[in-house]
Amino acid sequence: MKTKIISAAVLAASLLGLGGCASMDRQTVGTVGGAVVGGLVGSAVGGTAATVIGAGAGAVIGNQVAKH
């Protein structure tokens, strides 16, 4: 339970931080946001390897979604 609360707090802080980056284009925001969310999901599911894979997959998905 404690891990979920920490993950939610990190996600909220990351999204607020991204909101302040007005100079970043939409695709960059999507990539970074996807990496953050993917990393958090990977961390919740498994260990270090899952976190890295989740962040990578999230970055790719976020980038592709932001293109459209």
Image (cartoon, grey):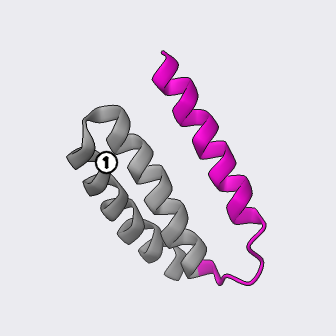
Name the outermost residue toward the top: 1
Reply yes or no: does residue 23 show up in magenta: yes
Q: Please state if 52 lies on the left or on the right of 2 as rendered.
A: left
Q: Which residue is mark 1?
A: 51
Reply yes or no: does residue 32 show up in magenta: no
Of 63 and 1, the residue lying toward us: 1
Task: Categorize mark 1 by other alpha carbons within 10 Å: few (<14), some (14-19), many (20+).
Answer: many
The residue at 25%/56% (across/down) is 53
Please tell me how many numbered marks the rendered image carries. 1
Q: Residue 27's quadrant in the figure?
A: bottom right
Of 61 and 35, the residue lying toward us: 35
x and y, in percent, of residue 29 in the image: 60, 72
In the rendered image, the vertical position of residue 60 relative to residue 47, given as above or below: below
- The three-letter code of the residue at mark 1 reads Thr
The residue at 50%/26% (across/down) is 4
The residue at 51%/18% (across/down) is 2
Q: Residue 50's quadrant in the figure?
A: top left
Q: Please state if 53 lies on the left or on the right of 3 as rendered.
A: left
x and y, in percent, of residue 64 in the image: 42, 76
The overriding secondary structure of the stretch rendered in magenta is: helix
Q: Which residues are magenta?
A: 1-26
x and y, in percent, of residue 58 in the image: 39, 60
Q: Is residue 53 visible?
A: yes
Q: Residue 10's quadrant in the figure?
A: top right
Q: Please state if 23 lies on the left or on the right of 56 as rendered.
A: right
